[in-house]
Amino acid sequence: MCTNAFPRWLQPMQGLLALALALLAGSAIAQSVLPLPAGVRNVAGTVRAILVQADGRVVLGGSFTAVDGIARSNLARLNADGSVDLGWNPGTDGSVMSLAATATTIYVGGWFDHAGGQPRASIAAVDSTSGAVLDWNPGMPSAMGNFVLALATDGATVYAGGAFQAMGGETRANLAAINGTTGTALPWNPSAGGLTSNVNALVVTGGKVIVGGLFEEVGGQSHRLLASIDASTGVVDAWTPMFSDLAFAVRALATDGQVLYVAGDFLALDGESRAGLAAIDLASHQPTAWNPDPIGSISSLAVAGTHVYVGGHFSDGGPYHAGVAELDAADGAVVDWHPSLQGDDVLAIAPDAGNVHLGGTFTRTSGQSTGGYARLDAATAALDASPQLETEASVDAMAVQPDGRIVIGGRFTEVAGIERSNIARLEADGAVDATWNPSADRRVAALALHAGTVYAGGSFWNIAGHARQGLAAIDGNTGEASAWNPSVAGVVYALLVAEGRLYVGGSFSQMQGAHRNFAAFDLASGNVLPWSVDADSFVNAIAATPSRVYIGGSFATFAGQSRSRLAAIDSANGSLTAWSPAPDRPVAALAVAGDTVYAGGHFAQVDALPRAGVAAIDAADGSVRAWNPFARGFVLALSTTDARLYAGGYFSTMADEPWRAVAAFDLGTSALTPWAVELDAHATSLAVSEDDVFVGGPFQHANGLSHAGIVALTLSDDPIFADGCDAAD
């Protein structure tokens, strides 16, 4: 990968020039980044709310960073032809979960602290023409622990539901009515449940506000999951629908004014079998005979004429397809309308004249990479003028093969413009391996290699075309999944291969039928070893020597004994050792060099000694070494060579120097080296090959150059030769 060879006529002066550059730049020497790998994209933005305006323009709310390559932060508007409205860009700094509108104003709810750069805690109003954030501000407390999940308008009143305890300067438990002009709370105050309750959905019809969610009472009366409230007075109706005992929540509501359609987690309603989906006659308050009986979970509903659209994550092996279905409003029969979606739930549905707009966590529609929004023809279900929604892309795990190729995992849908879903392999020159494509349906958070096999861990449910929850073994040549299926019920965050074993850590309630957050597998047989090594909370990092395995995470006990976030076991039999340094906060990364264990994480102290973000610990007795670079922030990744320790994370200073995201230390002197790279976000993963250092994370640029999610740097401190060339080239 030699692209910037130093001019031969200047080679005699290279040392002086390098010194001059170092003096000009201060102590840090920014490494020249290698041209490949070219970066990753994540066309997987989530849409949670859709609002179709009278002029055909469509407002999208959710969790995304760009629409068709145009920066948009969680809120965007599309023109009637599907293009991005370039003049409308309020944006929020957190997720948008609900939308409602009047003729001139769009109301936005979610979980954010700012809208359009203005302080707005989880609820805001936007001018429907210009996109400017209005002065309207109900003044809910900080978004921390407070969010708005549902909005509806009725004349000059805005109704809000969610999880909050105050709104418009007044105490309001999860449900409020707000003056649509002033932002003050109206006297209407039925109160839905308490601190552990929330309102997920609401509709206004016939002078009533009907609310659904997770609550046991409304207005001080027993009303479980569903209630009807007078829209003017706030008086709760006596109607009390009875759900099955195991019912958890109502998640979506829709109505045509005569019938109320209800979706959620329930098996029966008023003594009638209704699996997650029911219809209630609003005049009699009795369930109708309408009973589609889907298998799965429904997250969204919409009514359009004689049809009801349902979205979620469901399948009965027959008429329900890809998370969305069209049902006959009269008898519940499935209509022959079958969109082709790939991914997860459909969270929002908005029919209009001739189209059906879908939002959710899916990533592909009709074979095209769309992210979580699709506009479909209402008659044929064909994809019609849908943009691509992007969200943060990141390379969160890397493993370098002996032949120089590197396997990467994380959250992405493309690598260098080539479709790759959350896992890919790069050739030694940084190009994408064109033939190796296991494809995972969710994030790959950890990777390990052994004898031609790639072990992948994460939050996925399917990988390489097979059902594999959280952990899989993939053939390093073909990309096919092996038959090995350890049945993880949860998420894998850490993997390590050492001494013929695979060590697995994460947050999983079960593995092969036993409760554990840590496990060891024999690589020869594939069986889990019968060690009593469970942690009581997450395991985020694993490192090893020939005789010990070191484990880091957020646990307080390990193998039944007190171990604060760090522990070590004997690698021969899994017995817990006495090694017990005690960081005060979670450990995110571990590395071993010689007789030292390096730990990175969110901690400020280890064994009551100040050690911010990173620490060196004696591998034998657990004593904390004197080395203390003091990271202002936290360290998420560590990697070593024979001579250096590389640290990556979310920090702004290191060893009293302004140093962002990535740093390198000399293992001999423990000093911070001049080696550096300027990233526009933090680093989450590191890997070292014979010549290069690979850095992964949610960044978009390295040293001012476009390198989204991954960048390769050379090991040299010399910025002139950082492209890997030498004087003989």
Image (tube, helix red, strand yellow):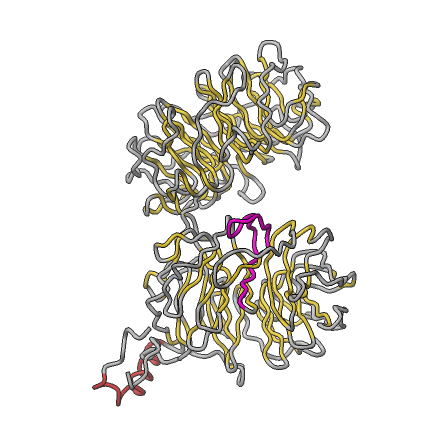
Nearer the observer, 428 or 476: 476
Can residue 119 be seen here? The reply is: no
Q: State the image coordinates of residue 360 (x, y, percent, origin top left).
A: 47, 38
Q: Residue furthest top?
A: 283
Q: Quadrant of the C terminus?
A: bottom left
In this view, which residue lies farthest toward the bottom?
A: 12
Residue 473 relative to residue 549: left or right = left
Relative to 34, residue 473 above or below: above
Left or right, 325 with respect to 708, comes to right
Q: Is residue 205 above or below residue 21?
A: above
- Quadrant in which the N terminus appears: bottom left
Decide whether residue 48 is among the magenta residues.
no
Q: Nearer the viewer, residue 565 or 91?
A: 565
Decide whether residue 463 is among the magenta residues: yes
Q: Which residues are magenta?
A: 452-471
Coordinates of residue 509 in the picture (x, y in percent): 69, 50
Q: Viewer-proximal residue, 575 or 86?
A: 575
- Measuring from the top left, give residue 291's x and y in whole percent: 59, 20
